[in-house]
Image: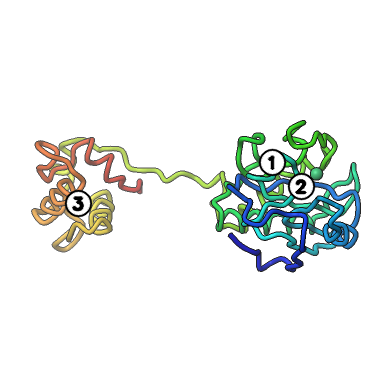
Amino acid sequence: MAKFKGATWRPIASNYRPGGQSSVRGLVVHIMAGTLTGTDSWFRNPAARASSHFGTGKSGALTQWVDTADRAWAQADGNSSWLSIENEGKGGDTLTSAQMDRIADVLAWLHRTHGVPLQVASGPSGRGLGWHAMGGAAWGGHTSCPGPRIVAQLPEIVARAKRLAGSPPADKPKPVYAPFPGVDYFRRHPRSPLITAMGKRLTAEGCGRYASGPGPQWTEADRKSYAAWQRKRGFGGADADGWPGKSTWDALRVPAA
Ligand SMILES: [Zn+2]
């Protein structure tokens, strides 16, 4: 567990439990009802009995007060399994774009270091990006923290964290594979782009040569390569004869031309 290099580290001397973070389900978003500097002072006051791991300012400052190995006191029963981020502002505010970027920074980092999934949490027993009110009475009954306008911003924060983490966009087209052309195809069409594509797949799988001769064609070397691949993938009997059948062809996943 750790400190985030993207945050200004400002440790506090009290108001947290060292080593008390038993698990990390995700990050809970709060609203300060105050300023970043005011919150920083408050967390240093032993009388506060309150803290959070992180805090943002409206202009994009990011502070870390508590190491993620330690338990901050931000959401009652949720403290042992959730990290926390306070945000400068008052009830009814929306987060600034700079604050959303900082939360996304922290979430993407927690994804890498603590395996937190990049999603809006479904509730206290879920994982991902949560918010204080989702914990209900067990989390102190703070039904207005951080407020519905900020809860509505959580999907956008997750989307920004995904871009930071390099996750593929959801609308990335799925690869299309060539359907099995039939048992006789390879005897009747010994020269075709499909043979070339198949040979490239066999080569990529580490199963030898393909398309010996002047151009793409089905040869004895291809048959041996195909048989080697079939054995490597655990096919046997009639599925390991070096000739494509539907099951082995589908498993090879030859890209459609
Ligand atoms: Zn809160």
Label 2, secondary structure: give it: loop
Label 1, secondary structure: give it: helix
- Regarding residue 163, the answer to whether it shows in the image is no
Looking at the image, is mark 2 or mark 3 earlier in the sequence?
Answer: 2
Looking at the image, is mark 1 or mark 3 earlier in the sequence?
Answer: 1
Mark 2 vs mark 3, CA separation in Å:
68 Å
Task: Look at the numbered disc 1 and say if its residue's Cβ is closer than 8 Å to ligand 1.
Answer: no
Mark 1 vs mark 3, CA separation in Å:
65 Å
The residue lying at 90 percent from left, 57 percent from top is 35
Q: Quadrant of the N terminus?
A: bottom right
Q: Are marks 1 and 2 in contact (CB under 8 Å)?
A: yes
Q: At label 3, which amino acid type do we have?
A: Arg
Mark 1 vs mark 2, CA separation in Å:
8 Å
Picture coordinates of residue 186, whole percent (x, y): 16, 44
Q: At label 1, which amino acid type do we have?
A: Gly
Q: Name the residue under label 2.
A: 74
Q: Name the residue under label 3.
A: 191
Residue 78 is labelled as 1
Task: Look at the numbered disc 2 and say if its residue's Cβ is closer than 8 Å to ligand 1.
Answer: yes
The residue lying at 17 percent from left, 60 percent from top is 208
